[in-house]
Image (cartoon, grey):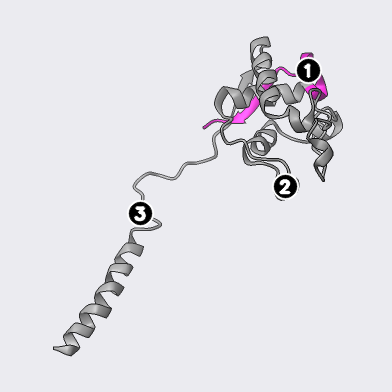
Amino acid sequence: MIRHRFAFTHALPTVLFAMSLAGCGGGSSDPPSAAAPEPASTEVTAALLERGAGVYKANCIPCHGPLGKGDGPSSAMLDPKPRDHSNRTYMDQLTDQQIANTIVQGGAPKYPNMPSHPHLRGEDLVAIVAHVRTLGRGRDEVTTVELAAK
């Protein structure tokens, strides 16, 4: 009897654990996707830029300043200093998607002072990326924003 209790109390949890692992990982009946989706291109309009300026004002000006130079009122306390969005040479090295990812996910590990903004998505995210682009390029040179379709 003791031998059966040992087998039941030790073997049953092991079997249940193994069965739970069998459900993890594989077995999807959906075919794998062939490739990552193409970025969605959004035309930049005056209304989109206006929306982006408002989102930027509400979320970014304290550190980056109104012109995006990294000289907002909170920047004096930060090390490293906030990125200068008006530095076209640097900003043109970034894709729209990289800018969006930094906005949403934050700047860690390279710029840990840059907080994440996961609440910014959809048209607000497209609008703020467009606005950030205008800080370095000017309004006339920002015609589209390309972000991954979700």
The amino acid type, in three-letter code, at marker 2 is: Pro
Badge 2: residue crowd in 10 Å (few <14, some 14–19, many ≥20): few
Which residue lies at the image location 79% right of the left edge and 23% below the top edge?
66
On screen, residue 70 versus residue 5, left or right, reads right
Place residue 103 in its image quadrant.
Answer: top right
Residue at 68% in and 26% down: 129
Residue under label 2, please give it.
112
Above or below residue 61? Residue 19 is below
Image quarter of the N terminus: bottom left
The amino acid pointed to by label 1 is Glu
Q: Could you tell me how far apart the alpha carbons at marks 1 and 2 are, in whole angstroms? A: 30 Å
Above or below, 108 against 94 in this view is below
Looking at the image, is 38 positioned above or below residue 27? above
- Give the residue at mark 3: 27
Residue 122: within the magenta? no
Marks 2/3 in contact by CB < 8 Å: the verdict is: no
Packing grade of label 3 (10 A; few <14, some 14-19, many >=20) is few
The amino acid at mark 3 is Gly
Q: Where is residue 97 in the image (x, y as percent from the top left)?
A: 66, 34
* Span highlighted in magenta in the image: 135-150
Q: Residue furthest top?
A: 46
**Residue 71's x, y, as percent?**
84, 31
Residue wearing tag 1? 141
Quadrant assignment, res 68: top right
N-term-proximal mark, 2 vs 3: 3
Q: Which of marks 3 and 1 is nearer the N terminus?
A: 3
